[in-house]
Image (cartoon, helix red, strand yellow):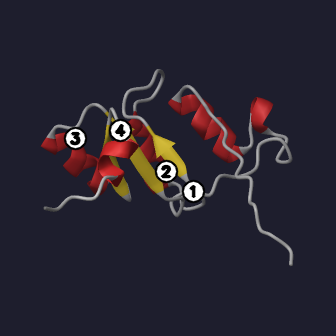
Amino acid sequence: MLGLHPKPLVQTVTSGQDLKDCLDGQGRFADREAFPYPSLIMLDLRMPAMDGFEVMAWLKSHSLHAAIPVIVLSAFDQQQNIRRAYQLGARTFLSKPVHPKASATPSGP
């Protein structure tokens, strides 16, 4: 029996402009073997060059990229920011810091 052990490729970019270049295959991201098109974006709201809201608005306005699911991960978790992220197309909003062990603990008596 053949076991399935996928090894997802994770690319990290440090600015909104880098993300745009990555999606468009521009500059250092032109090699799609090294930088394949993403199937998911985890996005912080606070970034240099373009903030997360600007990135989501850009994604929404470019039909080629608009279907990529976006998960926002941010410490800016005021209700107005969460609402705006969802209006711009975020699939979910996670507040930083994320504590996976705490959220994985079952609750109950």
Q: Residues within 10 Å of mark 1 (few under 14, many from 20)?
A: some
Where's the N terminus, which quadrant?
bottom right
Which tag, 2 or 4, sits closer to the chain's start? 2
For image coordinates 37% across by 34% down, the residue present is: 45
Front position in the image: 41 or 98: 98
Badge number at residue 65: 1
| Residue pointed to by mark 2 | 59
Q: What's the distance in space between the residues labelled 1 and 2, CA to CA?
A: 6 Å
Instruction: Kindly identify the residue that appears in the image at 56 percent across and 54 percent down.
Output: 40
* Circle 2 residues within 10 Å: few <14, some 14–19, many ≥20: many
Pointer 3 or 1: first along the chain: 1
Residue contact at pointers 1 and 2, CB within 8 angstroms: yes
Three-letter code, disc 3: Asn
Tell me how far mark 3 sits from mark 2, CA to CA: 17 Å
Can residue 70 be seen in the rendering of this structure? yes
Q: 75 and 2: which one is in front?
A: 2
Tell me the kind of residue under disc 2. Leu
**Element carrying mark 2:** helix
Q: Which of the two discs, 3 and 4, sits closer to the camera?
A: 4
